[in-house]
Image: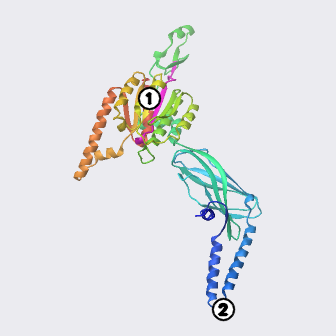
Amino acid sequence: MTKSLKNLWDRFLFQGRGILPSRRLISIFIILSLVLLVLSFGNLSWWAFIFMNVVLFLVSLVDLFFSPKKKDLHFKRHIPDEMERNLSYKVQIDVTNMSTYSLSFTLIDGIPQSFQSTFPMNGRVDQLITSTLEYETKASVRGEYEITMLYFRYSSKLGLWKKQMTIDLTNKIKVIPDLTETKQFLENAQKYLLFEGNKIRRHQTGIGDFSQIRNYVVGDDPRKINWRQTAKLRQVMTNEYEPEHGKYITILIDCGRMMGAELSKGNRLEKALEAAHLVAAAALQNGDYVSVLAFAKDVKVFVPPAKGMAHLQTILHSIYNVTVDSAESNYAAVFSFLEAMQKKRSLLLLFSDIRTFLYEEHALLYLERLRQRHLFLMVGIEDVTLQMRTEEKPESVQQAMIKSIAQQQMLFKKKEKIKWERQGLVMIEAKEEHLATAAVSHYIDIMNRNLL
C-alpha cells in the first residue's frame, strides 16, 4: 500500500487530517445516480448523467464555507493525574468554537486500549461558545500511561462534508492499586476490623512509652498511681502511657510467576499490593517505620524505612507499577539482601504464594537466621480450586482421583506449615476478599501483644 493510499485509509478510520464526504452526501449521490440511470434508458444521454453529478459535487462544496475553520477550534482535556484500578472516573473535554458557524461533531479520545470506555461520542457546539463533553472510563491495568491524541470530526448545518482533525493533547496518568480498603481503614479502623473478630485493644498495664503524669480520675487503673508525685502534691496522681511507637515493619511483596494466577477480580499480585498498602497505612498511622521490598528473581523495588503518613505516598509511587515476572521468585537472594539492609529488629510481613514457598528448602536456612533478630509472618491467598476439589463428592473414577490428589496436596501443605511454624515462622491464608483485613488484623494483634 502506497503512502497516499495509507493516509486515505487512516482518514476513513478516524485518524489523520482531511475532508471526508458524509453519509448524507453519499446517500444523495446514490439516489441521484439511480434516478439518472433509470432515465438513461430513455432519452437521457450519458453526458447529461455525468454533468449533473459534477454539478451536484461542486454545489456540495459550498457547504465547506459554512463550517468553522480548524484554527477556530480549541480543545482541552480534564483527566485525573492518578486513577485507582477498576474504579470509574469522569473525563471532560472542552471544545471551544471561536467561529460564527455552529457544528456537529463526533469525537474519539486516544486513551489506551486497557481503559474501558464507549466511543465514538457525538455532540454539538454553537458559535462563539465552549461545550463540555463528559465520559466515564476505568483502567484495569496498573502502570504509567500517556494520552497524546484526540480525534475530532465535525460538519456544518447541511452536513454534506466532514472535516477531520487529530489534536495533540498530552496527559500523563498513573494507574495505582485500588485504595478503597485503605480509605475505609483510615476513616474508622475499629469498624473496619470488627467483622474479622479482631479489636484494637489497649496495651497491657505499664507497657508502652511513658507519656505524662496527670490527676487520677474515676476509672483509671490504681496500679498506675504515681505515689511519689501523690505524696509531693498531696493529691492522687497517675502515670499515663501511650502505645509504643517507632517499631520497624518490613513488607515483602512477591512478584514471581505464581503471583500472576488470576482470581475473581484481578490476580494475586493486585490483591497483595492492596493489602500491603493497607498494612503500611495502619503502621504509619501508628507511628511505626515502614519499608517495602518488591522482588521476583531479583529485587525490583526497595523503599527504605521511614515514618509519617507522607511516607505512604512514597511507597505508593514506588510500587504502583510493579508487574508479575515470568521467572520464579528467588527467596534466598531476597532474604540475603534483607539481612544486609535491615539491621534493626522488625516484623517481616511477606505476601506470597504459600504453596510455592513451602518447596523452597534454601529459604528456610536464611529465615532461621533472620528469625533470631526479626519476627516473620507470611500471608497468602487460599487456593479456592484446591479447596473445592477436596470437598466435592466424587461421582466417577476420574473425579475420585482428582479429589485424592487435591487432598494429598492439602495434607502436604499442612505438614510443611507445621514444620515451618515450629521454627517460629507463622503462615496464614485468607480468602482473596479478606486478604487485606487478615493482614492488618494480624499486624494489630502483634502490636497489641507486644511481640515485636
**Nearer to us in this view, 235 or 265:** 265
Look at label 1 and name its amino acid. Leu
Q: Image quadrant for the N terminus? A: bottom right
| Residue at the image position 23 percent from the left and 53 percent from the top | 396
For this view, does 413 lie left or right of residue 277? left
Mark 2 = which residue? Answer: 43
Mark 1 = which residue? Answer: 348
Residue 135 in percent (x, y) is at: 60, 55
| Residue at the image position 26 percent from the left and 41 percent from the top | 408
Q: Which residue lies furthest to the bottom in this view?
A: 43
Whichever of callouts 1 and 2 sits on the residue coming sooner in the sequence is: 2
Residue 65, picture quadrant = bottom right
Q: Answer yes or no: do the residues labelled 1 and 2 have beta carbons within 8 Å?
A: no
- Tell me if mark 2 has few (under 14), some (14-19) or many (20+) residues whose alpha carbon lies within 10 angstroms of its own: few
- In the displayed structure, 129 sits above or below 452; it is below
Residue 145 in percent (x, y) is at: 58, 46
Mark 1: which secondary structure? strand
C-alpha gap between disc 1 and disc 2:
94 Å
Q: Image quadrant for the C terminus? A: top left
Residue 118 in percent (x, y) is at: 56, 58
**Nearer to us in this view, 273 or 187:** 273
Mark 2: which secondary structure? loop
For this view, does 350 lie left or right of residue 138? left
Range covered by the magenta-colored residues: 240-259
Residue 292 magenta: no
Q: Residue furthest right?
A: 100
Residue 304 in percent (x, y) is at: 53, 28
- In the displayed structure, 183 sits above or below 15; it is above
User: Can residue 309 be seen?
Assistant: no
- In the displayed structure, 241 sits above or below 384; it is above
